[in-house]
Image (spheres, helix red, strand yellow):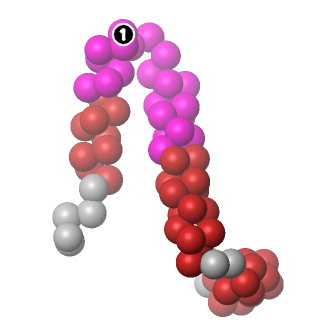
Amino acid sequence: MNLKKNPNHKIYIQALRKMSPEKRLSQAFELSEFTKQLFIHGLHKRFPDLSAEEFKKLLLERLDKCHNRNY
């Protein structure tokens, strides 16, 4: 999807530009936490029968696959 053609993207960028750097950073942390919780929820729905220990192992494996190794 080309975000530059999405009219909502322009509004989003305008809103970000009006925020202080501290507020933008706070928003980034909130979005990151929300994304992580959504990911965890999806894994729970997909693998409902795993024990807590098995789930934690699966979660850590999946998160490791998502890690950006360019840093």
Task: Note whether 25 is above or below 38 in the view shown.
Answer: below
Q: Residue at x 57, y 47 (%)?
A: 34
Label 1, secondary structure: give it: loop
Residue placed under numbered mark 1 in the picture: 51
Where's residue 31, x and y in %? Answer: 57, 56
Q: Residue at x 62, y 69 (%)?
A: 23
Dividing the picture into quadrants, the one containing residue 12 is bottom right
Q: Which residue is drawn at 44% across and 11% down?
A: 49
Dividing the picture into quadrants, the one containing residue 68 is bottom left
Is residue 52 rendered to the left or right of residue 38? left
Task: Note whether 19 is above or below 37 in the view shown.
Answer: below
Where's residue 29, x and y in %? Answer: 51, 57
Residue 45 part of the magenta-drawn span: yes
Residue 31 part of the magenta-drawn span: no
Between 57 and 19, the one lying in front of the other is 19
Is residue 26 rendered to the left or right of residue 12? left
Q: What stretch is highlighted in magenta?
A: 35-57
